[in-house]
Image (cartoon, rainbow, N blue to C red):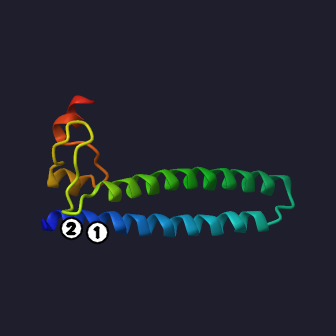
Amino acid sequence: MNAMHGEVRQQLLHRRKTLLALRDLHRLAAEAVEDSGAPEWVDRAVALEEKQMIARLDALERWALHEVDQALERLRPDDTVQCEACGATVEPERLHALPEARRCLCCAARTR
């Protein structure tokens, strides 16, 4: 097993763990906003803004978690990734820089 690919798997697992922890924190923050009661109209407006911001964060974290899970599924048993466009092996350096990469450098450059 290539040490760099093993690093990529660990990076992805660490990102996944971090994203799950962030989602838990944001759920707690949303509950705190709900429980605040917000008696004044200004407080209610601030609470609504906070709820909307937390909802946007949750959507971004859900998307990022999906991308990490997809990247983990793309890792082959030998910890390489096949380019979804041409079928070549994605370069280890690219995976190290962008663990969620779906395409090799050549194919990624063509799609820009």
Q: Is residue 39 left or right of residue 108?
A: right
Question: Front-most of 26 and 41?
Answer: 26
Residue pictured at 34% horizontal, 57% vertical: 73
Quarter of the picture containing the N terminus is bottom left
55 in relation to 83, above or below: below
Give the structural element (helix, strand or loop) at label 2. helix
Place of residue 35 in the rendered image (x, y in percent of width and height, measured from the top left): 78, 68
Depth check: give the residue in front, 43 or 72: 72
Pick the quarter of the image with the C terminus.
top left
Q: In whole angstroms, how far apart are the C-alphas of marks 1 and 2?
A: 6 Å
- Residue at 23%, 52% in the rendered image: 81
In the picture of the structure, the residue carrying the numbered disc 2 is: 6
- The amino acid sitting under disc 2 is Gly
**Name of the residue lying farthest toward the front:** 77
Name which residue type carries label 1: Gln
Q: Position of residue 66 (x, y in %)?
A: 45, 54
Q: Is disc 1 in contact with disc 2, using a CB cutoff of under 8 Å?
A: yes
Where, by quadrant of the figure, is residue 79 drawn? bottom left
Q: Which residue in the structure is indicated by mark 1?
A: 10
Left or right: 14 in relation to 82: right
Residue 50 shows which numbered tag? none
